[in-house]
Structure formats: structure tokens, C-alpha cells
Image (cartoon, rainbow, N blue to C red):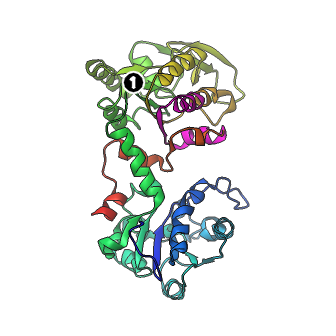
């Protein structure tokens, strides 16, 4: 990006401003917006103007009763005032993504000014990657900047397709994208050993490709969350009413066998916090993960599991963490995830490189004020997963092709 001359130019920039809003449309977590500020400010400081594109939510999946888009709920105009405050410059808002108004407002933009286009996903052509819609978007600016890592795995118009309408010297990544790619590279290319992958979440099926990829990369795999019980049951354990993917039991056995063959150690939770129903107010007890009583379900890792996992983490030089250890959104079953966050931060302080990606893992380090105590927190859960799985992300390929 620093090789491009932005003086007097309009940069059309894809950002990921898909931020959570409360019922009054106030932003409850500004992280994604703040991560994009360095890129926006760089263009402005170097004599350029910025035209911002983003999506917010899934408006076409939640239409009004008459079939129209719910503009009130999903408009990006909710973000203009907060962004103006963050940047210290007024942010103009365009009530459409492409069209006559968008063209006029973009043409009138002067150096140092910022324009926010309306939600790209108000247009069905966005997710379809429509060529003509992409061409219209591209016509609004002279330089294309993609700083939306969170959507880099989507071949949408604004994230991928429109890049082809700019010469290679006029398309670039923003600083956030550069940082995401660089830090993913640190765990994928010649990482220091021991290398530990911590993975959690509900289902093995969501992480099959990732787990298989890890078998060729890491020394240790820690498995927590609901997916752990498929492995425990596959080994003959009694897991009560815990979440189990019955059709994935043979796969779990296969993954365990492959790990043993490759010398990769897989750690499953020795014990669990089991509850008598899926509810924060449920009765709960600490039990061995392979002897969970009928009618009870594992909703978090137990104290022995935490201690065992901590030991592995603290002896690691490279750590990647994706997915919670339990039902993190329920306070009674969040201790495992929080304890892992503390252990990862402690290992980082001791010299390990740590990358945290995926909603609940990121939420845990943010909630505990540990985000600046790990090496890197990824803004893109799905995109980071696909990159770690070895897939080529269309949003990255489009800029570098």
C-alpha cells in the first residue's frame, strides 16, 4: 500500500464494518471499525479521498413482510457518526451503493474527505459476484483497497470481482489485510516447536479439514467444546446427553489413529462440567468426561482438563487457538475458555507466538482485557479458518493476481 501514490486520488476501499448493534442501533463492539482506521487515515494523510464499502448483517435473508429490504435495521448510516468521531473528520453518507447519487457524490469527493456507501448486501448482485454491478462499483474510484479480511473468503462483487477493473498497480491490501496474511504465515510457514493447536466449538464436522491440516503442522492438538465428546464416545466413553455427532464417530477414530501415526499428541478433556440441562441456571457437577451420567451433558472442561491443557500451552513456542472450550455465552460454563485465554497470554509473555481467531476465542481475550497480551487477534473467523485449512482465499487472489 505504501508504494501507491494517493495524492489527489479516490480510493474505493472494502472494509468489514459488520459490527454488532443493540436495539437502538448503537454499536456494542467497535473493534472491526477501529482495526480499519490506520488504512483509512493513511489514504487521507497522503492526499487521497476514501469511498467506503461494507456489508452489515444479512438483510436479504431478513426482508420486511412486503419483501422489501429492512433499511432501518441494516443501513450503514448507523455507523457514520461513530466513524466520524473515530476519524476526526465528517463522514458523508450515500443512500445507495451504486447509481446516479453514488456516482455524483463520489465525483464530488475532495482530498481528505470520506464517503460511506450504503450496505453492499442490499443488492442481490453483491453476493452473486455480478460483473456489471462490480464494474459500477469500480467506476466510483481510481484505486481499489481491500482491507476486509473477514470477508476475504467470499467471492462477492465488492470483495473480489471488482478488483479486476483496476490495473495491478492500482489495487492493494490495506494494513489490516497485510497483517492478517503476515501473521497467518507465521503459523503456516516454519513455526517454532512445540506447536500447539487449540480447537473447540460444537461440531467435529465444522473442523474436519482444519484438524486434518493440523496433523501435518503441529506437535499437539487440544480439543475442547462440544466436539470433544464425539472423540470421547468414539473411544468407548459414556457421555450422557452431551453433543455427539454419531455419524462422525468412525472419523474421530481415524483422526486419532492418523495423529498417533504422525506423532501428534491429541489432548481431550480429562473431566467436564456437566449440567442436567442446557441452561445457565441448570444444576452442574464436575465429572470424568468418559463417565458423564445419563441425562447430563458436558458444557465446559473441568479443573483437571484445564490444568493439563495449561501445561501443554505453557510448554509451547507457537500457539493457534480457534473455538471455545465450553458454552462460553453462559457464565457458569465459561471458566474453561477464560482459563485457556489466560494460559495463552501467559505463554505469549514467556516468548511464544500466539494467534487467536474465531468469534468466541476472540471474545474471550477481549472480555478479559488480554487482546494486547497475545501476539495477534484475527478479525476474520471464517477467512482465517479457510486460510489455515490451506485454501486460496478469493479476496486475496483478486488483489495479487
Vertical placement of residue 237 versus 185, above or below: above
Which residue was labeled with disc 1?
220
Q: Which residues are magenta?
A: 341-368
Q: How many marks?
A: 1
Position in image of residue 18 (x %, y %): 56, 59
Which image quarter holds the C terminus? bottom left
Chief SS of the magenta region: helix
Position in image of residue 146 (x %, y %): 43, 64
Secondary structure under tag 1 reads strand
The answer to whether one can see residue 56 in this image is no
Residue at image location 50% in from the left, 87% down from the top: 107
Vertical placement of residue 330 versus 253, above or below: below
Residue at image location 60% in from the left, 38% down from the top: 365
Q: Is residue 122 left or right of residue 125?
A: right
Q: Is residue 294 left or right of residue 368?
A: left
Tell me if residue 198 is in the magenta stretch. Answer: no
Q: Nearer the viewer, residue 114 or 304?
A: 114
Which image quarter holds the N terminus? bottom left
Residue at image location 36% in from the left, 36% down from the top: 210
Q: Nearer the viewer, residue 165 or 269?
A: 165
Position in image of residue 46 (x %, y %): 50, 74
Vertical placement of residue 307 versus 152, above or below: above
Position in image of residue 105 (x %, y %): 54, 85
Residue count near mark 1 (Cα–Cα under 10 Å), binned few <14, some 14–19, many ≥20:
many
Q: Is residue 236 left or right of residue 108?
A: left
Tell me if residue 366 is in the magenta stretch. Answer: yes
Vertical placement of residue 59 versus 318, above or below: below
The answer to whether one can see residue 172 in this image is yes
Q: Nearer the viewer, residue 276 or 11?
A: 11
Amino acid at each position: 500500500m505504501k508504494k501507491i501514490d494517493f495524492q489527489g486520488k479516490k480510493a474505493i476501499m472494502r472494509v468489514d464494518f459488520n459490527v454488532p448493534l443493540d436495539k437502538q442501533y448503537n454499536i456494542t463492539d467497535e473493534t472491526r471499525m477501529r482495526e480499519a482506521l490506520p488504512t483509512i487515515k493513511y489514504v487521507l494523510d497522503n492526499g487521497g479521498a476514501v469511498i467506503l464499502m461494507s456489508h452489515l448483517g444479512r438483510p436479504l435473508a431478513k426482508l420486511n413482510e412486503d419483501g422489501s429490504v429492512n433499511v432501518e435495521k441494516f443501513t450503514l448510516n448507523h455507523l457514520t457518526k461513530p466513524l466520524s468521531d473515530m476519524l476526526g473528520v465528517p463522514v458523508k453518507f450515500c443512500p445507495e451503493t451504486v447509481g446516479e447519487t453514488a456516482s455524483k457524490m463520489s465525483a464530488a469527493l475532495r482530498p481528505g474527505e470520506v464517503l460511506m456507501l450504503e450496505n453492499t448486501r442490499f443488492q442481490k448482485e453483491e453476493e452473486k459476484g455480478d460483473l456489471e454491478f462490480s464494474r459500477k462499483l469500480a467506476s466510483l474510484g481510481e484505486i481499489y483497497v481491500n482491507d476486509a479480511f473477514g470477508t476475504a473468503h467470499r467471492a462477492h462483487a465488492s470483495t473480489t470481482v471488482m478488483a479486476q477493473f483496476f490495473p495491478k498497480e492500482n489495487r492493494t491490501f490495506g494494513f489490516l489485510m497485510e497483517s492478517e496474511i503476515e501473521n497467518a504465515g507465521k503459523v503456516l510457514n516454519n513455526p517454532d516447536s512445540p506447536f500447539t493447536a487449540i480447537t473447540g466449538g460444537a461440531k467435529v464436522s465444522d473442523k474436519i479439514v482444519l484438524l486434518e491440516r493440523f496433523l501435518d503442522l503441529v506437535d499437539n492438538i487440544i480439543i475442547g467444546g462440544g466436539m470433544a465428546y464425539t472423540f470421547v464416545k468414539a473411544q468407548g466413553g459414556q457421555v450422557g446427553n452431551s453433543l455427539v455427532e454419531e455419524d462422525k464417530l468412525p472419523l474421530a477414530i481415524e483422526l486419532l489413529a492418523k495423529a498417533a501415526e504422525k506423532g501428534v499428541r491429541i489432548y481431550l478433556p480429562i473431566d467436564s462440567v456437566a449440567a442436567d440441562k442446557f441452561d445457565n441456571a441448570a444444576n452442574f457437577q464436575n465429572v470424568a468426561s468418559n463417565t458423564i451420567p445419563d441425562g447430563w451433558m458436558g458444557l465446559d472442561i473441568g479443573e483437571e482438563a484445564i490444568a493439563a491443557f495449561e501445561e501443554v500451552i505453557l510448554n509451547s513456542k507457537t500457539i493457534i487457538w480457534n473455538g471455545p472450550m465450553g458454552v462460553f455465552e453462559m457464565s457458569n460454563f465459561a471458566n474453561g475458555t477464560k482459563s485457556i485465554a489466560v494460559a495463552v497470554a501467559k505463554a505469549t509473555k514467556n516468548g511464544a507466538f500466539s494467534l487467536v481467531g474465531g468469534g468466541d476465542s476472540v471474545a474471550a481475550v477481549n472480555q478479559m482485557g488480554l487482546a494486547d497480551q497475545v501476539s495477534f487477534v484475527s478479525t476474520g473467523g471464517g477467512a482465517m479458518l479457510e486460510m489455515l485449512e490451506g485454501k486460496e482465499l478469493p479476496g486475496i487472489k483478486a488483489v495479487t493476481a
